[in-house]
Amino acid sequence: MIALHPPFTEEKIRALKVGDEVAISGVLFTGRDAVHKYLHEGGRLPEGVSLRDGIIYHCGPVVIKDEAGAWKCVAAGPTTSIREEPYQGQIIREFGLRGVIGKGGMGERTLQACREHGCVYLHAVGGAAQVLGECITRVRNVYFLKEFGSPEAIWEFEVKEFPAVVTMDAHGRSLHQEVLAASQAELAKYL
Amino acid sequence: MTFLQESLIELIRRASAEIPDDVQAALLASLEREKQGTIAASALQIIQRNIELARAKSQPLCQDTGSVLFYVDAPPGFDQIHFAETAREAVRLATRKGYLRQNSVDAISGANDGTNVGPGAPCLHFEQHRAPEVTVRLALKGGGCENVGAQYSLPIEKMGANRDLDGCRKVILDAVLQAQGKGCGPGILGVCIGGDRATGYEFSKRQFLRKLDDRNPDPRLDALEQDILETANKLGIGPMGFGGKTTLLGVKIGALNRVPASYFVSVSYMCWAFRRQGVTLDAEGRIARWLY
């Protein structure tokens, strides 16, 4: 397990390879379908949100207000990333992302942007909303809550030792492409 | 609060936070099969820890608490309107308690009113049966696995899929290949052979009400279920698509009559976080028995 702490420098990110298990500490911003489409169409990030050398998390958490009126995250696993494929490459380049956390992997254009800019795709375990939610030590803020609704808002989380696996690295390797090709070849034997 | 409303909230809570025993057993068996030290084994260990945490904290296994699907069997004379109203209120309250995410949005505007109640939400299926009791089954089906569902219209020449069981086998395995890890595998397939485009998908989902360790009473479908399960687990897709030995935990196939012109195979995919629960209610609406 590789501990990943801020600052998330290009050097640290380029040192990661497909198959590496990492434990991320620091700040994550969530962003999923609505946020990606909005940024792609030229929307600006709200004040207080910077993705430069940052990590975006494809996640629509369950967050409720506790008795004292503070946000409490009750469940926060990754959502399927491939839906952001039309937008992700552009967002990595324009906003200077170093990491994208999600599930299911992404496509060629994202892989290309990861290689050019120095970014990795980090696969969290889909459905593991409790294990991953426990790694969120603080809900710092929320943006676009009214505009996009709770699951689609930008949540700012502080995390400690958030587990993920590098499945697309900054050297052009994608575990998803490899497993797809291997499973396709294997299936051909049984048809 | 009426007994019925209390029972339905408890049904939602348990479905959201507790994995059914049959699924837990299948996941434990899959963990034993994976080679220790691999990322596949590590993913399954996180899944096991997640199952324990969700149960202990009474919080959702997965943050995508999905489409809320009720399947109700009741005797003639049962008041469906009253039940539907109570179920909608139970969904509202369960959402406020955090058992369900604010997960239902206006299809066109995307507006989320935070209640999980609206056109088609929750989804209620009623059937009459000649028995005195009322049974309520509930499935919470997440969007990630719903998105990898597929419907095939046979024949499909480029796949060599003709209108026979071998053609069905080919397209079902194609659905597994296309899904890779995107549906949060190891998954469970619900399949319907036949029907029309709407009933085919509906019946494929209804297969998820079967227990994973049951056997299909139709020997042809039983053989196909075992074959697909075994073959899919040879493909090396593995948990989360990380590569590994367990790609599927189960396959359930049903068949509906079709018109001669149509031959649909509808495949629904359920993630490992297989949230389904069920109860039998007594005359006052209290939970008499848990079904899974």
Image: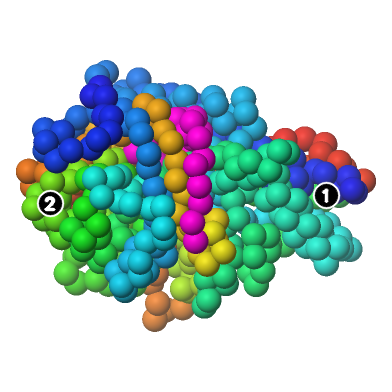
Where is residue B14, by image quadrant? top right
Q: Is residue A138 shown in magenta? A: yes
The outermost residue toward the front is A47
Query: How many angstroms separate mark 1 from mark 2 (CA)?
Result: 54 Å
Q: Position of residue A25 (x, y in %)?
A: 35, 30
Region of the chain picked out in magenta, as a range: A124-144
Q: Is residue B157 visible?
A: yes
Q: Residue at x 21, y 53 (%)?
A: A96
Q: Position of residue B101 (x, y in %)?
A: 59, 50
Q: Position of residue A22 (x, y in %)?
A: 26, 29
Q: Residue at x 59, y 39 (%)?
A: A72
Residue indicated by mark 1: B5
Q: Amino acid at mark 2?
A: His
Residue A142: mark in rendering: none
Q: Chain of mark 2?
A: A
**Colour mode?**
rainbow
Nearer to the camera, A40 or B119:
A40
Residue indicated by mark 2: A117
